[in-house]
Image: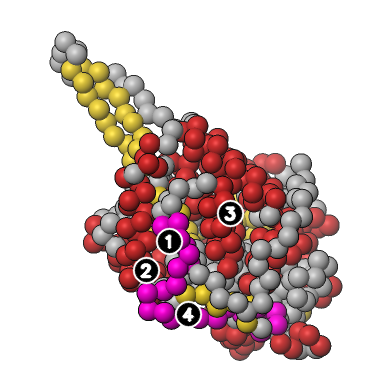
């Protein structure tokens, strides 16, 4: 089913005005009075200022979350939490275009792609609504002497601290807030300073839906000033983080003070394997957009493209042609397929990898140049790049680029490509293209990754768990496993004889 949202008037014109953060049901500025600008990456224009939250603001938000957790929110029945999540989903659907415009303007996501995410995001909210009434323990027969009944209960873990990245503000916010509401937790969410506006809009929708004060709090600020105090806070029971592996490692160390629960969805260097029997009409565009979507700023980007040697040259030629035909521009244009990179810093990072590829001997067969014609001159636009002649040891084949860069690598046998595909510290996702069912099952089983897609990519469903192996983190988002991440299991013994 395709969602067709009913247009509503925009609440915010994204015209440079100041926005406040949301703590304890109130809109407030930072205790320090400091603020920072957020800019449209396509035009460089300031679209808002937001508070530069710090330790005092985190203290206030965590206190509000704890008060709410211990207060009336703790007495909400499962069906009441379900009804609340369904109201939120309905409000999201009504305001979907406004949410999309916010994401597009604040972080550059093409609006056509943002709008296409409606079923996924709304489906997530409604999935968590369903899960709110499906949480249960077990009655377990024991081997103890006497007549003792034993059972388990599932209880909310408590106050959750959530830190999300800038590349998917809407989905990342829902992936953190949805299970918290379903399980009866409260949450303090810190969005990226690069794209803080959509989470603030989401806070408005939460309040309008009737979420009690203090259950959902949004504190804007930098990782050092706001994120670190949230991770270290002794009254936060769980941290959920999506972002880079390096930051995830620092979060894990910082969370040790009270041994809080931690879930980490981190980086990736995902392999895509194109077998000789693949349907190239399907494989070329899907493999291309496994990386180029969102300008490569996706943790699951299939940036290591292993192609069977007999079809390698033809595939790379088709891939380069596809990359050159993609429409690049301001994401607010519904015909745009590739938007800008988030910032000048990210643009320089991607350019550094492009230089590294050339210096280490890879052949750039398409793209890579900065686009400066016309209106593009004011933004951070780079043409989607395709490298051939890449070896497994090159920097572009080893490190996460987070930009629209594909490295094509030929392979000869399935055993060989499996060894090479798994030879990475990451294990977030992988793709396979083949017409052979046996090959599909064999490779899916042997790939060391949390998600494997066969003859497709980016297929994410609310009922399916998503997360990584190895340095791509641990814990799952989506599915029953995700809800369990927000619950404690208690064992109860009652002697009745």
Measure how far apart labels 3 and 4 are at the Cα level.
23 Å
Give the extent of the magenta segment: 21-44
- Looking at the rendered structure, which numbered label has been put on residue 23? 1
Which residue is tagged 3? 205
Mark 3–mark 2 CB contact (< 8 Å): no
Q: Residue at x 15, y 15 (%)?
A: 145
Which residue is tagged 4? 35
Q: Quadrant of the N terminus?
A: top right
Measure how far apart labels 3 and 1 are at the Cα level.
14 Å
Above or below residue 300? Residue 367 is below
Measure how far apart labels 3 and 2 are at the Cα level.
22 Å
Q: Please say whether residue 357 is visible from this viewpoint.
A: no
Which residue is tagged 2? 57
The local crowd at label 2, few if under 14, some if 14 to 19, many if 20 or more residues have their Cα within 10 Å, is many
The first of marks 3 and 4 along the sequence is: 4
Residue 38 is a magenta residue: yes
Mark 2–mark 4 CB contact (< 8 Å): no
Asked whether 68 or 1 is in front, the reply is 68
Q: Position of residue 356 (x, y in %)?
A: 59, 85
The first of marks 1 and 4 along the sequence is: 1
The local crowd at label 4, few if under 14, some if 14 to 19, many if 20 or more residues have their Cα within 10 Å, is some
Where disc 3 sits, the SS reads: helix
């Amino acid at each position: 089913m395709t969602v067709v949202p009913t247009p509503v008037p925009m609440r915010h014109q994204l015209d440079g005005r100041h926005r406040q953060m949301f703590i304890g049901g109130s809109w407030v500025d930072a205790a320090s009075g400091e603020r920072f600008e957020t800019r449209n990456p396509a035009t460089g224009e300031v679209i808002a200022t937001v508070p530069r939250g710090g330790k005092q603001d985190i203290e206030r938000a965590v206190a509000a979350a704890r008060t709410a957790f211990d207060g009336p929110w703790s007495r909400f029945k499962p069906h009441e939490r379900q009804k609340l999540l369904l109201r939120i989903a309905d409000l999201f659907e009504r305001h979907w275009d406004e949410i999309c415009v916010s994401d597009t303007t604040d972080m550059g996501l093409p609006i056509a792609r943002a709008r296409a995410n409606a079923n996924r995001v709304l489906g997530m909210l409604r999935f968590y609504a369903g899960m709110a009434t499906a949480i249960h323990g077990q009655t377990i027969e024991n081997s103890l002497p006497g007549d003792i009944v034993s059972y388990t209960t599932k209880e909310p873990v408590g106050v959750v601290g959530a830190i999300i990245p800038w590349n998917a503000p809407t989905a990342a916010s829902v992936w953190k807030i949805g299970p918290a509401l379903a399980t009866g937790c409260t949450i303090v969410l810190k969005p990226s300073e690069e794209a803080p506006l959509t989470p603030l809009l989401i806070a408005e929708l939460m309040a309008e839906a009737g979420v009690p004060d203090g259950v959902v709090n949004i504190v804007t600020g930098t990782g050092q000033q706001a994120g670190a105090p949230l991770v270290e806070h002794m009254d936060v029971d769980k941290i959920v983080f999506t972002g880079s592996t390096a930051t995830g490692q620092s979060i894990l160390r910082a969370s040790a003070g009270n041994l809080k629960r931690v879930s980490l969805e981190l980086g990736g260097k995902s392999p895509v394997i194109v077998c000789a029997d693949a349907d190239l009409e399907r494989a070329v565009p899907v493999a291309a957009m496994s990386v180029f979507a969102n300008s490569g700023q996706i943790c699951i980007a299939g940036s290591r493209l292993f192609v069977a040697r007999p079809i390698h040259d033809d595939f790379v030629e088709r891939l380069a042609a596809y990359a050159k035909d993609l429409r690049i521009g301001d994401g607010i244009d519904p015909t745009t397929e590739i938007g800008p990179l988030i910032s000048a810093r990210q643009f320089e990072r991607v350019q550094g990898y492009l230089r590294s590829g050339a210096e280490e001997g890879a052949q750039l067969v398409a793209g890579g140049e900065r686009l400066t014609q016309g209106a593009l001159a004011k933004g951070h636009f780079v043409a989607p790049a395709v490298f051939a002649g890449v070896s497994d040891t090159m920097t572009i084949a080893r490190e996460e680029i987070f930009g629209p860069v594909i490295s094509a690598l030929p392979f000869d046998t399935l055993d060989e490509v499996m060894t090479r595909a798994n030879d990475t510290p990451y294990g977030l996702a992988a793709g396979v293209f083949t017409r052979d069912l046996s090959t599909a099952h064999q490779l899916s089983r042997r790939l060391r990754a949390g998600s494997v897609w066969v003859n497709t990519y980016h297929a994410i469903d609310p009922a399916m768990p998503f997360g990584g192996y190895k340095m791509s983190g641990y814990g799952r988002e989506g599915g029953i496993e995700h809800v369990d991440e927000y619950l404690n299991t208690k064992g109860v013994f009652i002697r009745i004889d």
